[in-house]
Image: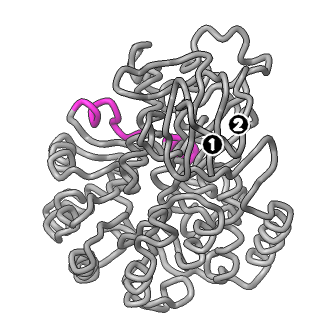
Amino acid sequence: MRTLIKDTSVLTLDEEDRILAGVDIALENRAIVAVGEAPPDFKADEVIDGREMVALPAFFNAHCHAPMTLERGWAEDLPFDRWLNEKIWVAESALEADDVTWGAALAAAEMIRSGTVGFGDHYFWMDKVAAVVEESGMKALLAWCHFGIGDDKEVGGVSFEETVAFVKAWDGAASGRIHTVMGPHSPYMTPAPVLRRFAEEAERLGVGAHFHLSESNEQVRNSLEHHGLTPPEYVAKLGLLDLPRPALLAHCNAATLEDMNLLAAKGAFIAHAPKTYQKLGMEMPPLPEMLARGMRVGLATDGPASNSDFNMLEILRLTGLHWKGALLNPEALPRMQLLRMTAQTSAAALGFPESGVLAPGHPADLQLLDTTAPHWIPRHDLAAGIVYTAHPGDVAYVWCDGQLLYRKGEFLTLDIERIRWEAEHRAFRMVGKPMSSLREYAA
């Protein structure tokens, strides 16, 4: 398939941060072959008028729980412990495998609709999510969440061995669009022997791990009390930071300076999800200090039960605005850095390090935004427009690996009407069934 986007503006996110105007972009199969002027012999199967639009790399969401679309609006205005114990882990006692399929499909549609083509997912029945990724044309890093505190405490009663089998079966699937890793829940819920087993299996299979870490000062205090180590020190001791692929760590809200140095040295990726922290009244991770110490931080939504949606444009905006205000410094977290964090660092965290740049030879993961709406005018600064002005409704076209997934309101790989019906039907079925508490949060 050959596609030519004509006469458009381009936010390249290349090393020079070039912003081009009135140029063409040529896509062939899975790659970008030209940005500027198409080769003279390039014969396009489809030509798209790019006038009044801006092309930029598609977004990657570093950490989420995609099927939790079914719990959107189910647990509101509660602190973290009650949010888990009274609502989330209760509702999930009624979760079924097919619910995960449709919850993930709804998430995929929402992400594509807002310019996101890849996500790091940490949830249950990941084989169902993998099938959605394969069908939708997206990219993903998938981890089957496992607590390791007894099969009766796991969603669906799934065993440790089943989660390992998933990792082996699906890694590299969908022509390389799917990567898999181990998914221990966290060091505060998963016992040390199980964490060691995860590290051993990851080493054997040549993969990494994705889990929650240091979400609160309480978790850090309890880790010091029980293990004599902070959570990052503890998981490092158990081998989870020295795996064949870098660890992906969700949150790290309460990371100490020593923790930051350790995680930077280990090359771990951190997923930063500011809307969840604000909504649940949690401490904001020390993002500027993390970046100053060389940590690799990508941006994320977290799950829609805490974040409510998958709008990475909003995450860009919240991240920049929070730190400019908190530091009383308008130069903090400049717009190009924010864009790199979600288009490049998040992509690398998911195992797609070549994505995030519009240049020949890079994967054709890109989006076209319509800039004609009143909130875009005047278009002095396209990067500022994307970070501080753009709406998901501005997204007009989305490609992943050269495949067109979305065109002006039309989903090309997903049956959106069936997805909407199934997801809402299953969400109300789930919370309408008799429910019980699967487990209790203990920091």
Residue 149 spot, x, y in % from top left: 38, 85
The foreground one among 335 and 68 is 335
How many angstroms separate mark 1 from mark 2 (CA)?
A: 6 Å
Residue 396 spot, x, y in % from top left: 73, 37
Which of the image's four quarters has the C terminus?
bottom left
Provide the residue span drawn in magenta.
Answer: 274-292
Which disc is residue 395 wearing?
A: 2
Q: Main secondary structure of the magenta part?
A: helix
> In this figure, which residue is indicated by the disc labeled 1?
115
Q: Amino acid at mark 2?
A: Val
The reply to whether residue 282 is in sight is: no
Which residue is drawn at the image coordinates 46% and 42% (left, top)? 299
Which residue is drawn at the image coordinates 58% and 38% (left, top)? 42
Q: Are marks 1 and 2 in contact (CB under 8 Å)?
A: yes
Does 189 sit above or below residue 416? Answer: below
The foreground one among 135 and 238 is 135
